[in-house]
Image (tube, rainbow, N blue to C red):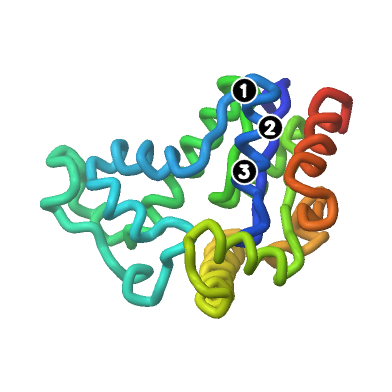
Amino acid sequence: MTGHKIITIGRQFGSGGHEIGNILATRLDIPLYDNNLVRMAAEKLDIREETARAVDETTLNSFLTGYVIGPMEYRDSIRSDEYTQPLNEQVYELQSEIIRKLSRRGPCVIVGRCAGYILKDDPGCLDVFICADLDERIRRIAGRYDMSEKKAADKIKRIDRERKYYYESHTGLEWGSALSHQILLNAGRLGIEGTADVLELMYRGEWR
């Protein structure tokens, strides 16, 4: 138990969840942890960040799931019997350990990486899932990446599928379900700033 407040954000791709996390962290003057968790895990494993990112939440596939980290990429002092653990599991377990340590350090916003599930027993953790209507997400991604709406829709479908697999394979819960998260917010209806407003009010109030 940390004794302070943490907001974890799961999100559909293109819903604005990461942007909302950034806005919250800035307004509340607390740290935001997202892709930097991959870098932290890579440093702990003594592997390239690109290698760790290859098995992060949006790039899992059957080949990488079975990939085993090799001795040349691991620190010399590690025991050889640990090489048998698939790399994606090593990254997940290290990220989980890092998330727990960061949550004990102080208030923060954590985006993705099953953080809400990892901190589910902490009464100070608010586990939020951000969604938005598909048409709005397509427009957002098409504009952000300067691509056609067809390509944007394909990208959304692929990344949502991978995030769903990552979450469900590690938690046994349904990604984006009201039974899996404490609160679901439709950023398409509330707007990015409006969604951040709701979460800021919850943070500054008492949700326990």
Residue at the image point whose x is 72% and y is 36% from the top: 125
Q: Which mark is residue 19?
A: 3
What is the three-letter code of the residue carrying label 3?
Glu
Residue at the image point whose x is 55% and y is 66% from the top: 142
Q: Could you say whether the residue bearing mark 1 is in a helix, strand or loop?
A: loop
Whether residue 208 can be seen here: no
Q: Could you say whether the residue bearing mark 3 is in a helix, strand or loop?
A: helix
Give the side of residue 83 with respect to residue 161, left or right: left
Residue at the image point whose x is 84% and y is 50% from the top: 190
Q: Earlier in the sequence, mark 3 or mark 1?
A: 3
Give yes or no for contact between labels 2 and 3 (Cβ–Cβ under 8 Å): no
Q: For residue 110, which quarter of the picture?
A: top right
Q: Nearer the viewer, mark 3 or mark 1?
A: 3
92 vs 183, nearest the viewer: 183
Quarter placement of the C terminus: top right
Q: Which mark is residue 30?
A: 1
